[in-house]
Amino acid sequence: MAAGPTDGEMREEVTTVEDEEAEFLAYLAAATSKTSSIDVSVFLLPARSDFMAFQGYISLGMYQLPLYFSCETPGGRVRMSSIRGDCRLRALWKRGEWLNTGRLERSLDVGSFATELEDMLSSPLPPSLPPSAFKEGKTLRRTGVTAPPAVYRQLLTELQALGWANARDLSPRPPQGGAEDGLQGGAEDELLTLTLAVQDSAGREHEVLVELPSHPSPSVWPRCQARLPPVEEEAGGGAGWLEFDRRHLLPPSTPHSPPCSHFHLQLVKEQFQDRIAAFQDFWDVMDDLDRHAWVMGGASERFRRESRERRVVLHAHASCVINIDPLAPYKPSHVEFVGPEAVIGPWTRRLYAGIGDWDTARMPRQNLEAILGFPFPAPPTPLDGEGNGGGKGEGWEAAYVEECCICYAYRLGDGSSKERGDIPTVTCENERCRRLYHSVCLRQWLQTLPDVKMIRGGLTNRTTLLGSCPFCIEPISLEVDAVSFV
């Protein structure tokens, strides 16, 4: 076990903090004694997308003091108890002769708060308080607001150049720590992530999450995350962190490079646009399905830009899952029909017989409609409502149920699972029932039945469960991996 700090080390740390305060306040006293005022400016950025918190710094002469606070309403009155900074700002905050906290409390919004703060700090330091009066020997804790002010200056400059409309979210580390003398300490409130909105060549909007280092340097690189369709590893695609080409993302560093000059959000945007250019045909195909077919799951599925599949309603209690290759979207698609065998059997035979007539100059939807011999049902209109048919028509469309009839959800979890059961794919064969189920939900249901039968697949690693439908009590079967039935 590592030994803790000795009493001497603790006294040295406290003395160092006190010396920092005394040196800082002595500088202010000397600076204001030579001139009637000192150069003061306050730089603030929203720390949350709802404008309920702000962070930045106060430029006070040669010093730059980190600052963080939250608001009672978006951009409104500042919560005085939430203000936090380092030991130098804490030292100022406890001296009411210079900082009139009553005036700050009466500020109606963030703008007036910053103006009042600049005005008070621009006034001379009261001569009745010599620098020695500030060294009282009180232990102070350092805060975790460690990002240099240059970070915020650089970020503000780049966001203004990029356009504030392209910045969707600024996410800091959640505030922690307690309050003391109206100024909190002990937290790590650093700007961590920035969400940028980027448009592709067709005007579709995508979001890329940029992880910003709190101490940028030539050796620290921003990491970017976006939702992209998964492709084969050798093709260089896949969802997750995007490791941009570092040779082109950032300019080479030199000994005279200014600090914090290595965000370059414009380069991030340009390289992300280059990355998504390979998927333009793929998204054209998916948009065609979304516009002309009844995609199960409603808007939540249509806006899943990373998804390479769509489940399309074909008829009462029958649908198909169409899987598109992101790098070759016009080639014959993998299609899996879902529904009673009496309904989907003829479609499967037509697909196998007509796959040779596939025309890569046409949309996959048009090819499938020509092979199956009927057009796909149109999506529900806004008046009909999303999903479930939404009152569409007088026939089977009005009663079509997309959700699992056990958990009453369409997609399990966040949809990141690769299991086939993350959407309802099992249908009861009873014509008077035709209920849909997630394979996971149905498996859990069958496992609770005392009379469930299990047929092992012999040489295969598959097991068939035989039980009864939760609704009609008619026989129903489910094939699962043997390891999943443990």
Image (cartoon, rainbow, N blue to C red):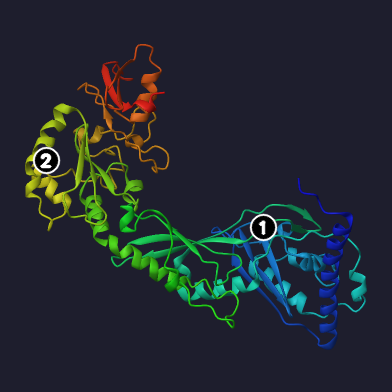
Q: Which mark is residue 188?
A: 1
Q: Which mark is residue 351?
A: 2
Horizontal and vertical percent position of residue 90: 79, 64
Q: Quadrant of the C terminus?
A: top left
Horizontal and vertical percent position of residue 140: 82, 60
Give the alpha-carbon distance from disc 2 to disc 1, as whole Å.
59 Å
| Image-based side of 460 in relation to 187, left or right | left
Q: Quadrant of the N terminus?
A: top right
Give neighbour class at mark 1: few <14, some 14-19, many 20+ (Cα, 10 Å). some
| Image-based side of 307 in relation to 126, left or right | left
| Mark closer to the chain start, 2 or 1 | 1
Q: Which mark is residue 82?
A: none
* Amino acid on which the number 2 mark rests in the picture: Leu
Under circle 1, the secondary element is: loop
- Residue for point 57% across, 64% down: 213
Note whether 7 is above or below 252 in the view shown.
above
Q: Can residue 406 be seen in the rendering of this structure?
A: no
Under circle 2, the secondary element is: helix
Horizontal and vertical percent position of residue 437: 32, 29
